[in-house]
């Protein structure tokens, strides 16, 4: 069944790891070293922990590359892989009942183990709630889970199909819904709940919606969208705890609610990797080929924080496009081909009747440039880096303008050199504002 693959393995491992012998043999300095050594490894058994989009795509990419060996996929949820983005959108409005991903485990030759969680990792062996799985290569694709607030009251979250199903049943006309957090999930849920006739209040500790993701200056442009949809948005309002019948506020105040949804972000759940040698920070730390600090263990999707040469930092991207594409690089690594993973990140959100899209990464940008009128239906915010002699587009957010987004993403990927005056003019196509990279 198996195949011999040429693997390039990192020459730096955690202290005490036996992989250090290889590094020492090569007389390399301690610490992370991008140099690799080529070894011939027989890969017969790939185990994937996590049966979401990234897990499934890894299996598909492996088969697409001709990998003939065994693939075991272990998923904590009892459902086969499904898509999450529709859960706040067409599923929540009732236009869609099934968000399953189109995949045939039998055709993929996939040993799919559902309702089973990975609980530990030791040399070449994945432990789960039901057993142990030896592997030649392991892919960690365990996603992320919602952060919760303190308090004894019922706190709903929206991450899984079951969460969404229960919430959809409960969001009846007239229900007082309080959403904590004006992020992507909060804004989308507020949109659909208001459409279902609920009385919706969104409380946000920050000064603007989406401030953590896109900054307050751009996030503030979305404020008028809330009252226009009949949603009561309360900014600068922290929450002390979730109690029966409402939210306790830090100043002693009380906000009554029938349903409270906590939408304040997600975090990878990685305690089970303690002692495994897999380096964990803000997510599972992987290099530009999505390899963890343990040989032949990879990570992809929401749980992985990869080294981006493009942005000169580690990125953990909690978006669908990343879970879709990163597995190709993992499968390439497992099958012995080296393709780096360094995308221009992309995501979209559908809120208050608008298509909002973002490409790039704006941390470290020097200035913001508006394209079109942010009070209107179609506009963009463009983040530029560099001095005025050589402005580079590093990220853009578009509202109601997919064409600008697509062109902007290409311009960023090509290096980002732009003429700011032309970029600010909505009559000029984004691609025509690009300059040759110098
Ligand atoms: P997940 O989809 O989280 O899958 C990981 C799986 O691993 C889960 O099933 C989990 O139960 C399982 N697991 C966890 N721990 C273990 C363990 N120890 N052992 C075994 N299995 C385990 N992105 C966008 O770009 N645009 C959108 O509009 C958008 N909308 C969204 C709406 C909602 C409601 C949600 C929740 C997400 C949305 N996203 C959106 C984000 C996108 O869905 C995620 O980025 C994507 O699902 C990540 O895929 P993943 O496979 O990495 O993780």
Image: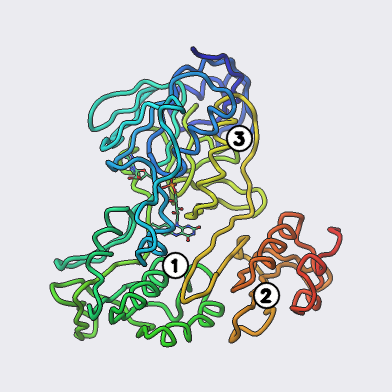
* Percent coordinates x, y for residue 172 in the rendering: 24, 73
Mark closest to the chain's N terminus, 1 or 3: 3
Q: Nearer the viewer, residue 140 or 17?
A: 140
Residue located 67% across and 75% down the image: 367
Numbered circle sitting on residue 367: 2
| 399 w.r.t. 431: above or below | below
**For residue 262, side relative to residue 110 (left or right):** left
Q: Nearer the viewer, residue 105 or 115?
A: 105
Q: Which residue is mark 3?
A: 33
Q: Which residue is mark 1?
A: 184
Circle 3 SS class = loop
Distance in Å between CA atoms under marks 2 and 1: 23 Å
Q: Residues within 10 Å of mark 2 (few under 14, many from 20)?
A: some
* Percent coordinates x, y for residue 404 in the rendering: 69, 68
Ligand 1 is within 8 Å of the C-beta of the residue at disc 1: yes
Ligand 1 is within 8 Å of the C-beta of the residue at disc 2: no
**For residue 207, side relative to residue 128 (left or right):** right
Q: Residues within 10 Å of mark 1 (few under 14, many from 20)?
A: many
Distance in Å between CA atoms under marks 3 and 2: 34 Å
* Percent coordinates x, y for residue 31 in the rendering: 55, 36
Distance in Å between CA atoms under marks 1 and 3: 37 Å
Q: Of tags 1 and 3, which is closer to the observer?
A: 1
Q: Can you say which quadrant of the picture contains the C terminus? A: bottom right
Image quadrant assignment for residue 102: top left
| 298 w.r.t. 393: above or below | above
Contact? badges 3 and 2 (CB < 8 Å): no
Q: Nearer the viewer, residue 146 or 114?
A: 114
Circle 1 SS class = helix
């Amino acid at each position: 069944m198996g195949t011999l693959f040429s693997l390039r393995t990192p020459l730096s491992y955690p202290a005490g790891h036996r992989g250090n012998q290889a590094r020492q043999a090569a007389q390399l300095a301690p610490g992370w070293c991008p140099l690799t050594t080529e070894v011939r490894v027989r890969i017969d058994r790939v185990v994937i922990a996590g049966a979401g989009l990234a897990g499934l795509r890894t299996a598909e990419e492996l088969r697409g590359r001709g990998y003939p060996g065994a693939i075991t996929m272990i998923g904590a949820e009892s459902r086969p892989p499904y898509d999450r983005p529709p859960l706040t959108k067409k599923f929540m409005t009732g236009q869609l009942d099934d968000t399953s991903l189109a995949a045939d485990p039998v055709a993929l030759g996939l040993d799919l183990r559902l309702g089973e969680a990975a609980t530990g990792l030791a040399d070449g062996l994945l432990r789960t709630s039901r057993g142990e799985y030896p592997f030649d290569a392991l892919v960690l694709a365990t996603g992320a889970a919602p952060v919760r607030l303190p308090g004894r009251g019922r706190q709903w979250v929206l991450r899984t199909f079951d969460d969404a199903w229960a919430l959809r049943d409960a969001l009846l006309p007239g229900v007082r819904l309080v959403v904590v957090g004006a992020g992507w999930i909060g804004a989308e849920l507020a949109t659909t709940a208001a459409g279902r006739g609920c009385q919706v209040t969104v409380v946000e500790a920050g000064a603007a919606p989406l401030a953590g993701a896109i900054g307050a200056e751009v996030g503030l442009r979305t404020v008028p969208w809330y009252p226009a949809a009949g949603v009561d948005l309360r900014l600068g309002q922290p929450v002390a705890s979730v109690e029966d019948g409402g939210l306790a506020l830090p100043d002693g105040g009380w906000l009554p609610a029938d349903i409270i949804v906590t939408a304040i972000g997600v975090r990878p759940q990685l305690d089970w990797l303690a002692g495994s040698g897999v380096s964990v920070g803000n997510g599972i730390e992987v290099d530009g080929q999505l390899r963890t600090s343990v040989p032949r263990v990879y990570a992809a999707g929401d749980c992985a924080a990869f080294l981006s040469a493009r942005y000169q930092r580690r990125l953990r991207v909690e978006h669908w496009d990343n879970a879709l594409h990163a597995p190709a690089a993992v499968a390439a690594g497992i099958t012995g081909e080296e393709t780096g993973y360094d995308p221009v990140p992309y995501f979209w959100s559908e809120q208050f009747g608008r298509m909002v899209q973002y490409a790039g990464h704006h941390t470290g940008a020097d200035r913001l440039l508006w394209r079109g009128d942010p009070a209107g239906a179609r506009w963009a915010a463009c983040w530029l880096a560099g001095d005025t002699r050589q402005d580079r587009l590093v990220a853009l957010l578009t509202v109601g303008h997919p064409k600008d987004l697509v062109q902007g993403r290409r311009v960023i990927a090509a290096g980002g050199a732009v003429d700011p005056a032309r970029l600010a003019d909505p009559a000029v196509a984004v691609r025509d504002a690009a300059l040759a990279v110098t």
